[in-house]
Amino acid sequence: MTEFDIIFAGPMKHLLYLDTTDKKSQLLILNEIKAISIRTNEIQMNHGQVINRQIKDMLEETGLSWGQIDGVCVLNGPGSYTGLRISLATAKGICYARTIPLILINKLDLMYHSAANIAREQALCPIIKARENEYFSVIYSAGGNQITEHSLSTKDELQTQMNLHQALLCFEELSYQTEFEHFIHLNISLNEILRLCIDYFREEKFADLYNSEPFYLKNVYVNKINKL
Protein backbone atom coordinates (compact mmCIF):
# COMPACT_ATOMS: atom_id res chain seq x y z
CA MET A 1 0.00 0.00 0.00
CA THR A 2 1.38 3.42 -0.95
CA GLU A 3 1.04 6.69 0.99
CA PHE A 4 -1.58 7.77 -1.58
CA ASP A 5 -3.63 4.65 -0.82
CA ILE A 6 -3.49 5.57 2.85
CA ILE A 7 -4.72 9.13 2.15
CA PHE A 8 -7.67 7.80 0.18
CA ALA A 9 -8.53 4.93 2.49
CA GLY A 10 -11.94 5.10 4.11
CA PRO A 11 -14.82 7.38 3.05
CA MET A 12 -14.84 9.18 -0.29
CA LYS A 13 -12.90 12.45 -0.18
CA HIS A 14 -14.53 15.69 -1.28
CA LEU A 15 -12.90 18.94 -2.39
CA LEU A 16 -14.40 22.38 -2.94
CA TYR A 17 -13.04 24.21 -6.01
CA LEU A 18 -13.36 27.99 -6.40
CA ASP A 19 -12.58 30.01 -9.53
CA THR A 20 -13.51 33.69 -9.63
CA THR A 21 -10.54 34.76 -11.78
CA ASP A 22 -12.55 35.82 -14.82
CA LYS A 23 -15.89 37.17 -16.03
CA LYS A 24 -17.54 33.78 -15.45
CA SER A 25 -16.99 32.13 -12.09
CA GLN A 26 -16.96 28.36 -11.60
CA LEU A 27 -17.55 26.61 -8.27
CA LEU A 28 -17.37 22.83 -7.95
CA ILE A 29 -17.67 20.10 -5.38
CA LEU A 30 -15.43 17.24 -6.48
CA ASN A 31 -15.08 13.71 -5.26
CA GLU A 32 -12.32 11.33 -6.37
CA ILE A 33 -14.27 10.41 -9.52
CA LYS A 34 -16.19 13.43 -10.81
CA ALA A 35 -17.68 16.86 -10.17
CA ILE A 36 -20.88 16.24 -8.22
CA SER A 37 -22.12 19.84 -8.06
CA ILE A 38 -21.46 22.88 -10.25
CA ARG A 39 -22.35 26.55 -9.96
CA THR A 40 -21.40 29.43 -12.26
CA ASN A 41 -22.02 33.16 -12.27
CA GLU A 42 -21.63 35.28 -15.40
CA ILE A 43 -21.88 38.72 -13.80
CA GLN A 44 -18.29 39.45 -12.76
CA MET A 45 -19.15 42.31 -10.40
CA ASN A 46 -21.44 39.93 -8.45
CA HIS A 47 -18.96 37.13 -7.75
CA GLY A 48 -18.42 38.27 -4.17
CA GLN A 49 -22.15 38.61 -3.53
CA VAL A 50 -23.14 35.11 -4.65
CA ILE A 51 -20.18 32.87 -3.83
CA ASN A 52 -21.22 31.93 -0.27
CA ARG A 53 -24.84 31.36 -1.24
CA GLN A 54 -23.75 29.14 -4.14
CA ILE A 55 -21.49 27.08 -1.87
CA LYS A 56 -24.40 26.63 0.57
CA ASP A 57 -26.66 25.55 -2.32
CA MET A 58 -24.08 22.98 -3.52
CA LEU A 59 -23.76 21.46 -0.06
CA GLU A 60 -27.53 21.16 0.18
CA GLU A 61 -27.73 19.69 -3.33
CA THR A 62 -25.15 17.00 -2.59
CA GLY A 63 -26.32 16.32 0.96
CA LEU A 64 -22.81 16.94 2.25
CA SER A 65 -21.98 18.63 5.53
CA TRP A 66 -18.97 20.90 6.08
CA GLY A 67 -17.39 18.04 7.98
CA GLN A 68 -17.26 16.04 4.74
CA ILE A 69 -15.27 18.67 2.82
CA ASP A 70 -11.61 17.62 3.01
CA GLY A 71 -9.93 20.62 1.35
CA VAL A 72 -10.48 23.77 -0.69
CA CYS A 73 -8.82 24.31 -4.07
CA VAL A 74 -8.53 27.82 -5.49
CA LEU A 75 -7.64 28.80 -9.04
CA ASN A 76 -5.33 31.53 -7.81
CA GLY A 77 -4.47 33.44 -10.96
CA PRO A 78 -3.38 35.04 -13.06
CA GLY A 79 -6.65 36.90 -13.45
CA SER A 80 -8.75 39.77 -12.15
CA TYR A 81 -7.22 41.01 -8.90
CA THR A 82 -10.59 41.60 -7.30
CA GLY A 83 -11.75 38.16 -8.47
CA LEU A 84 -8.64 36.50 -7.07
CA ARG A 85 -9.20 38.10 -3.67
CA ILE A 86 -12.82 36.90 -3.54
CA SER A 87 -12.07 33.20 -3.96
CA LEU A 88 -8.89 33.20 -1.86
CA ALA A 89 -10.48 35.10 1.04
CA THR A 90 -13.48 32.76 0.96
CA ALA A 91 -11.24 29.69 0.89
CA LYS A 92 -9.05 30.93 3.72
CA GLY A 93 -12.06 31.50 5.93
CA ILE A 94 -13.38 28.00 5.26
CA CYS A 95 -10.00 26.31 5.74
CA TYR A 96 -9.32 28.18 8.98
CA ALA A 97 -12.75 27.45 10.42
CA ARG A 98 -12.73 23.76 9.43
CA THR A 99 -8.96 23.08 9.86
CA ILE A 100 -8.66 21.68 6.35
CA PRO A 101 -5.92 22.27 3.75
CA LEU A 102 -5.82 25.05 1.18
CA ILE A 103 -4.65 24.14 -2.33
CA LEU A 104 -3.64 26.83 -4.82
CA ILE A 105 -3.60 26.08 -8.54
CA ASN A 106 -2.03 28.39 -11.11
CA LYS A 107 -4.21 28.75 -14.19
CA LEU A 108 -1.20 28.63 -16.53
CA ASP A 109 -0.25 25.24 -15.05
CA LEU A 110 -3.81 23.99 -15.46
CA MET A 111 -3.74 25.16 -19.09
CA TYR A 112 -0.43 23.34 -19.65
CA HIS A 113 -1.80 20.04 -18.38
CA SER A 114 -4.84 20.43 -20.63
CA ALA A 115 -2.66 21.19 -23.67
CA ALA A 116 -0.27 18.32 -22.86
CA ASN A 117 -3.13 15.92 -23.55
CA ILE A 118 -3.12 17.25 -27.13
CA ALA A 119 0.63 17.63 -27.77
CA ARG A 120 2.52 15.24 -25.52
CA GLU A 121 5.94 15.52 -27.24
CA GLN A 122 6.13 19.29 -27.60
CA ALA A 123 7.37 22.07 -25.34
CA LEU A 124 4.33 24.20 -24.54
CA CYS A 125 3.76 27.83 -23.61
CA PRO A 126 0.29 28.61 -22.18
CA ILE A 127 -0.59 32.31 -22.20
CA ILE A 128 -3.25 34.63 -20.80
CA LYS A 129 -3.50 38.20 -22.06
CA ALA A 130 -2.86 40.72 -19.29
CA ARG A 131 -3.36 43.94 -21.22
CA GLU A 132 -2.49 45.28 -24.69
CA ASN A 133 0.77 43.62 -25.86
CA GLU A 134 1.37 41.92 -22.48
CA TYR A 135 0.87 38.25 -21.63
CA PHE A 136 1.15 36.02 -18.59
CA SER A 137 3.10 32.93 -19.61
CA VAL A 138 5.17 29.93 -18.55
CA ILE A 139 7.01 27.32 -20.61
CA TYR A 140 7.08 23.58 -19.96
CA SER A 141 9.45 21.17 -21.71
CA ALA A 142 8.27 18.20 -23.75
CA GLY A 143 9.06 16.08 -20.70
CA GLY A 144 6.72 18.11 -18.50
CA ASN A 145 9.34 20.11 -16.59
CA GLN A 146 8.75 23.81 -15.97
CA ILE A 147 11.64 25.63 -17.67
CA THR A 148 10.69 29.30 -17.22
CA GLU A 149 9.17 31.23 -14.36
CA HIS A 150 5.57 32.40 -14.49
CA SER A 151 6.06 35.85 -15.96
CA LEU A 152 4.54 38.91 -17.57
CA SER A 153 6.03 39.54 -21.03
CA THR A 154 5.53 41.65 -24.09
CA LYS A 155 4.72 39.89 -27.34
CA ASP A 156 8.32 40.26 -28.55
CA GLU A 157 9.73 38.90 -25.28
CA LEU A 158 7.28 36.03 -25.43
CA GLN A 159 8.28 35.21 -29.01
CA THR A 160 11.96 35.22 -28.06
CA GLN A 161 11.37 32.71 -25.25
CA MET A 162 9.24 30.50 -27.46
CA ASN A 163 11.92 30.43 -30.17
CA LEU A 164 14.64 29.72 -27.59
CA HIS A 165 12.80 26.72 -26.16
CA GLN A 166 11.03 25.69 -29.40
CA ALA A 167 7.72 25.91 -27.59
CA LEU A 168 4.24 25.87 -29.06
CA LEU A 169 1.78 28.50 -27.90
CA CYS A 170 -1.50 27.41 -26.28
CA PHE A 171 -4.45 29.43 -25.06
CA GLU A 172 -8.19 29.33 -24.38
CA GLU A 173 -9.34 32.69 -25.71
CA LEU A 174 -10.33 32.50 -29.38
CA SER A 175 -9.62 36.18 -29.99
CA TYR A 176 -5.87 35.52 -29.62
CA GLN A 177 -5.91 33.68 -32.95
CA THR A 178 -5.54 36.96 -34.84
CA GLU A 179 -2.31 37.75 -32.97
CA PHE A 180 -0.36 34.50 -33.50
CA GLU A 181 0.24 32.10 -36.37
CA HIS A 182 1.06 28.77 -34.68
CA PHE A 183 -0.82 27.67 -31.58
CA ILE A 184 -3.03 25.12 -29.86
CA HIS A 185 -6.51 26.21 -28.92
CA LEU A 186 -7.52 24.37 -25.75
CA ASN A 187 -10.55 23.93 -23.56
CA ILE A 188 -10.03 23.18 -19.87
CA SER A 189 -12.31 20.28 -19.01
CA LEU A 190 -13.86 19.36 -15.68
CA ASN A 191 -11.86 16.14 -15.83
CA GLU A 192 -8.60 18.08 -16.02
CA ILE A 193 -9.58 20.28 -13.07
CA LEU A 194 -10.55 17.17 -11.11
CA ARG A 195 -7.31 15.36 -11.94
CA LEU A 196 -5.08 18.26 -10.92
CA CYS A 197 -6.99 18.97 -7.70
CA ILE A 198 -6.91 15.32 -6.66
CA ASP A 199 -3.21 15.03 -7.55
CA TYR A 200 -2.35 18.09 -5.45
CA PHE A 201 -4.39 16.71 -2.55
CA ARG A 202 -2.76 13.28 -2.79
CA GLU A 203 0.71 14.81 -2.95
CA GLU A 204 -0.14 17.18 -0.08
CA LYS A 205 0.75 20.27 -2.09
CA PHE A 206 -0.89 22.46 0.50
CA ALA A 207 -0.50 26.23 0.66
CA ASP A 208 0.42 28.31 3.68
CA LEU A 209 -3.00 29.34 4.94
CA TYR A 210 -1.86 32.59 6.54
CA ASN A 211 0.68 33.87 4.02
CA SER A 212 -0.92 32.89 0.69
CA GLU A 213 -1.69 35.78 -1.63
CA PRO A 214 -3.36 36.13 -5.04
CA PHE A 215 -0.96 35.33 -7.90
CA TYR A 216 -1.37 38.54 -9.85
CA LEU A 217 2.07 39.44 -11.36
CA LYS A 218 0.96 42.86 -12.57
CA ASN A 219 1.54 45.94 -10.46
CA VAL A 220 -1.53 46.90 -8.45
CA TYR A 221 -2.55 50.51 -8.91
CA VAL A 222 -4.51 52.19 -6.13
CA ASN A 223 -6.44 55.37 -6.85
CA LYS A 224 -5.62 58.04 -4.30
CA ILE A 225 -8.50 59.85 -2.67
CA ASN A 226 -8.31 63.59 -3.16
CA LYS A 227 -8.32 65.44 0.13
CA LEU A 228 -10.54 68.50 0.41
Image (cartoon, helix red, strand yellow):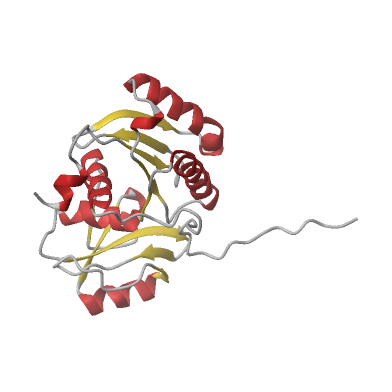
Q: Quadrant of the C terminus?
A: bottom right
Can you give x and y, in whole percent of width and height, for residue 215 in the image? 45, 59
Question: How many labels, in total?
Answer: 0
Can you give x and y, in whole percent of width and height, for residue 91 in the image? 46, 43
107 on left or right of 123: right
The residue closer to the viewer here, 217 or 174, is 217
**Residue at the image point whose x is 44% and y is 38% from the top:** 98
Q: Quadrant of residue 38?
A: top left
**Residue at the image point whose x is 40% and y is 32% from the top:** 40
Can you give x and y, in whole percent of width and height, for residue 4 in the image? 17, 49
Q: Quadrant of residue 224?
A: bottom right
When the figure is inspected, residue 143 is found, relative to residue 19, above or below; the finding is below
Can you give x and y, in whole percent of width and height, for residue 55 in the image? 43, 30
182 on left or right of 87: left
> Residue lying farthest right?
228
The residue closer to the viewer here, 193 or 177, is 193
The residue closer to the viewer here, 100 or 161, is 100
**Residue at the image point whose x is 33% and y is 39% from the top:** 70
The residue closer to the viewer here, 171 or 198, is 198
